[in-house]
Image: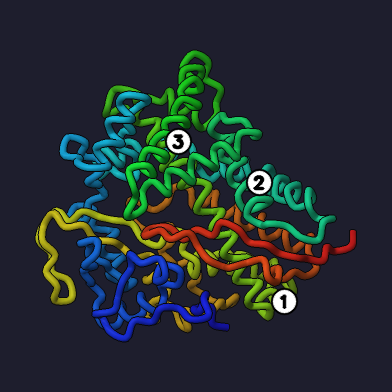
């Protein structure tokens, strides 16, 4: 069953002259625009942002492997040359908090490889297996907290707290603080949107500074008293090639971008989007719950492929490049559109459909690829698996609550964010 239409009347550009990706109505359902670009302009210069959007699967695969030509460096890392509102935010960080350092996601080799080695040790397969019982137990507990109500707001009561509590345990934060942390991650995301006012930038920056002052005492305690948590390792591990541990500024960047936003928001949005897909495609729901052992892992991959919580990320071109006859000058920024590639018919048959028997469902690019492949992907997959497994085990049937959902997403150029999803359900008898 096709899932391309997420609005009654999605924006469908007639030609490239009508194409737009920095428009809230287009972002609500960008897939018709992605389809046009894949077919007619696989390298498309967005006139509103000045960035080249790449939309075909094989092109993305090649770009993600070539980190010398397509750098992860971001212009926002160049503090000396910041102007306007970004400069104002920088000065505010410097005055009231810590200027965030360059995160793992914003580095190239050899620094990226050297820094990532520390993270890779923290996310080994054995460590993920050790966490699995806790992930399972938490998923069932969260559901049981509202199972007798017959209804819930799925984001607030399940999809958000599941990954947030897990990452809080790893990062030394208290479970009772998850909604403060959620407020900070929301502010971080909103503060990187388009067309922000000075007031909005100040608000988002101050929220991040508030988070910094929450975590700074934890860093200092862990330096005195290491406790074996993931954060303790990040705080105390010496990167051999650097001859030092991460600075406070680098730790603060990791906490917001790579850990809490990367480690919780994306899983929340994939889980919420996945349940919305099931609610809109009841034959898929019936088939899934008929044999979850057979279909659940594939469904998780299909949900991540179709929803693409990270719609696209930027790269900096380090030399002149020509692709599909389009010259991309050195110094240009490109957007690798994971969400467009994930629905490329050259890679995925019937790409707009949920196929519980799709053989290459896991070939999607939602976790990126190559050197910068998402290091938290194994944990995210376990969270999605146990989240949906608990839902199938506890819920006989459900529906998207009539009259309570507008099904809209927060407009964001890079992320797919669903803030609320109301459902009504019939629990299984136990």
Q: Nearer the viewer, residue 44 or 127?
A: 44
Q: Secondary structure at mark 1?
A: helix
Q: Nearer the viewer, residue 83 or 425?
A: 83
Rendered-image quadrant of the N terminus:
bottom right
> Which residue sits at x=66%, y=57%?
154
Q: CB of mark 1 within 8 Å of CB of mark 3? A: no
Q: Residue furthest top?
A: 224
Q: In the picture shown, does residue 401 fall above or below 367? A: below
Question: Would residue 324 be found to the left or right of residue 156 on screen?
Answer: left
Q: In the picture shown, does residue 80 fall above or below 132? A: above
* CA separation in Å, label 1 and label 2: 25 Å
* CA separation in Å, label 2 and label 3: 29 Å
Mark 3 closeness class: few <14, some 14–19, many ≥20 residues within 10 Å: many
Question: Would residue 141 be found to the left or right of residue 231 on screen?
Answer: right
Rendered-image quadrant of the C terminus:
bottom right
Q: Is residue 299 visible?
A: yes
Q: Nearer the viewer, mark 2 or mark 3?
A: 3
Q: Residue furthest right?
A: 430
> Which residue sits at x=54%, y=60%?
418
Q: Earlier in the sequence, mark 1 or mark 3?
A: 3
Q: Nearer the viewer, mark 1 or mark 3?
A: 3
* CA separation in Å, label 1 and label 3: 43 Å
Q: Nearer the viewer, residue 351 or 119?
A: 351
What label does residue 207 carry, if any? 3
What label does residue 193 carry, if any? none
Residue 170 picture location, percent across and down: 56, 35
What label does residue 135 carry, if any? 2
- Disc 1 target residue: 286
Question: Would residue 428 be found to the left or right of residue 142 on screen?
Answer: right
Mark 2 closeness class: few <14, some 14–19, many ≥20 residues within 10 Å: many
């Amino acid at each position: 069953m096709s899932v391309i239409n997420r609005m009654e009347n999605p924006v469908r550009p007639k030609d490239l002259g009508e194409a737009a990706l920095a428009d809230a109505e287009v972002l609500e359902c960008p897939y018709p625009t992605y389809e046009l670009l894949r077919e007619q302009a696989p390298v498309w210069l967005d006139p509103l942002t000045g960035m080249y959007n790449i939309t075909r699967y094989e092109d993305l695969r090649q770009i993600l492997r070539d980190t010398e030509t397509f750098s992860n460096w971001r212009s926002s890392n160049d503090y000396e040359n910041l102007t306007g509102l970004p400069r104002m935010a920088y000065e505010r960080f410097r005055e009231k908090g810590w200027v965030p350092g360059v995160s793992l996601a914003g580095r190239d080799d050899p620094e990226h490889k050297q820094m990532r080695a520390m993270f890779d040790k923290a996310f080994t397969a054995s460590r993920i297996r050790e966490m699995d019982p806790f992930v399972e137990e938490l998923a069932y507990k969260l559901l049981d907290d509202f199972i007798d109500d017959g209804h819930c707001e799925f984001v607030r009561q399940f999809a958000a707290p599941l990954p947030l509590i897990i990452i809080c345990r790893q990062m030394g934060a208290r479970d009772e603080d998850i909604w403060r942390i959620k407020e900070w991650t929301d502010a971080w995301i909103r503060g990187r949107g388009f067309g922000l006012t000075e007031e909005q930038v100040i608000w988002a920056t101050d929220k991040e500074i508030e988070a910094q002052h929450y975590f700074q005492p934890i860093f200092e305690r862990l330096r005195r008293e290491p406790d074996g948590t993931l954060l303790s390792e990040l705080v105390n591990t010496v990167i051999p090639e650097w001859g030092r541990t991460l600075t406070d500024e680098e730790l603060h960047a990791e906490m917001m971008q790579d850990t809490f936003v990367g480690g919780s928001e994306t899983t929340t949005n994939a889980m919420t989007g996945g349940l919305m897909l099931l609610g809109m495609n009841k034959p898929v729901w019936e088939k899934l719950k008929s044999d979850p052992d057979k279909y659940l892992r594939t469904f998780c991959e299909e949900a991540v492929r179709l929803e693409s919580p990270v719609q696209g990320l930027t790269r900096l071109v380090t030399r002149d490049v020509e692709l599909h006859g389009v010259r991309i000058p050195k110094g240009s920024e490109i957007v690798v559109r994971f969400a467009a590639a994930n629905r490329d018919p050259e890679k995925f048959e019937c790409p707009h459909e949920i196929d519980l028997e799709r053989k290459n469902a896991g070939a999607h690019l939602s976790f990126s690829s190559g050197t910068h492949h998402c290091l938290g992907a194994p944990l995210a997959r376990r969270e999605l698996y146990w989240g949906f497994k608990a839902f199938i085990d506890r819920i006989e049937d459900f529906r998207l609550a009539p009259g309570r959902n507008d099904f809209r997403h927060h407009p964001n150029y890079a992320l797919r964010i669903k803030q609320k999803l109301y459902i009504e359900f019939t629990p299984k008898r136990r």
